[in-house]
Image (tube, helix red, strand yellow):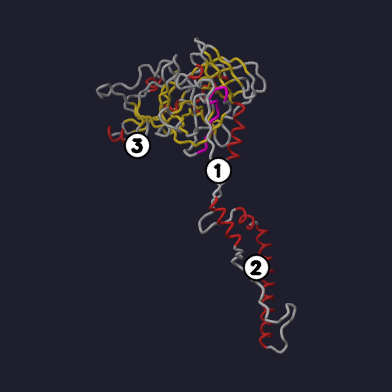
Amino acid sequence: MSDPSSTDIQRFEPVPDERHHRKAALDEAAGAGAGPATPERWFEPVAAPGAEPWAGPSPVSGRGSGRGLVGILFVTSLVGAIFGAGGTYVGLRASGALNAATAAPATGTGSTVLIESDQSTVIAAVNAVGPAVVEIITSDASGATAVGSGIVYDSRGWILTNKHVVDGTTGITIRLQDGREAPGSTYGLDTLTDLAIVKIDGVADLAVAPIGDSASLQVGELAIAIGSPLGLGYPDSATTGIVSALGRDLSVGANTATASTSLHGLIQTDAAINPGNSGGPLVDSSGRVIGVTTAQAQTAQGIGFAIPIDIAKPIMQQALAGEPLARPYVGVVYDMIDQGIKKQYDLPLDQGAWVHNEDANGKSIEAVAPGSPAQQAGVATGDIITRIEGQAVDLSHPLQDLLVEYAPGRKVSVEIYRNGAYLTLMLTLGTRPDALP
């Protein structure tokens, strides 16, 4: 969020460099009158002294006759070459090979690489999503105001934003890209992440953001952030970068009314994210929302974070269905297995979620909550959860990130490894308590 007060901007203008020494060198070369390295008429024979340019070979000179014969042979060969080349050209053009060569000319002996500017891609992506990005102006009990961003994801007035943008506020105003304003209300706050749903009513012709997919993201992909980084005076600002990393964990502080929130599985990006961007979209090269910007690193530059859109989809759907926002609950404490944990505890598998808990002294204790969905399904301390609904549980797909895509009440298959054998259990997801850390 951002304070909407004005901000002074300092200008920096480079001083042009006329580079007089280069201009003088060019002028001197031009004045010298030096001709081109290759004569313009290199293909014409030099005339013999005293001969007219139109005169034929001398009738009494055997050497002249030889030259004439050579000239005839040269002309004949040249004409044949021209006609032969013409035939080759026609054949290549008919086959399409000439077109391919023209489109991708070879350079050197290596393979050809065509490089295109991504300017048009960024413009198209911003045009696709920008009209659906709104400013969220909030006020609290003390009368202080702040500005965040939001994403219209349904034409009936449903808006996705950050929890810390609207939590603890007493008034919400939504400002659209075209300047229209409407009062908003908080439909619900996410109990798991820094997300919230806001609703506006009675607004026609709302632009809706195309929603993408974050499951298949790769490091290095184009990323575009849209929002209001300096408050009301700088709406619809777009910054570009890449997806810098995936699966980041972060603890973020909310406003004065709420405690900090631990966020998991975040997208890291170097697209500039600043206060006021909070709740705005992170967009991919196809012009679809892949994340919701939520925080920037305070101690470094070029490091921002966004909540993957796949994590937001369940609560977006719950709001459309008129259901309260809720997250799934299993009821286990676990460690994601990496090589260090495997070696330290001599575990039999390289990956999975190890159901494990320890007290302050490092002694193993019960890791399954009494009466929890996990206990009712038969999960026990020491099990390794290897798959959820057929999807492998690993460092790239942690247990929590897989579960969060399902709504409470959903029955899912859980594959576990226990005592050298794999078992499949059916588990009905519970509802995550609000107070759960």
Per the image, is 169 magenta? no
Q: Amino acid at mark 3?
A: Asp
Please say if 174 is above or below 19: above
- Residue under label 2: 40
Q: Amino acid at mark 1?
A: Pro
Asked which secondary structure carries label 1, the reply is loop
The answer to which of 418 and 267 lies nearer the viewer is 267
Please say if 138 is above or below 420: above
Quadrant for the C terminus, please.
Answer: top left
Q: Mark 1 and mark 3: span between their CA atoms? A: 60 Å
Residue 398 visible in the current orientation: no
Q: Which residues are magenta?
A: 221-233
Pinpoint residue 236: horizontal percent, then vertical percent: 58, 28
Pinpoint residue 99: horizontal percent, then vertical percent: 64, 55
Q: What is the number of the mark on residue 16?
A: 1
The answer to which of 160 and 144 lies nearer the viewer is 144
Q: Residues within 10 Å of mark 1 (few under 14, many from 20)?
A: few
Please say if 55 is above or below 291: below
N-terminal label among 1 and 2: 1
N-terminal label among 3 and 2: 2
- Residue under label 3: 350
Pinpoint residue 134: horizontal percent, then vertical percent: 58, 23
**Residue in the picture at 56% in, 20% down:** 136
**Residue in the picture at 65% in, 24% down:** 178
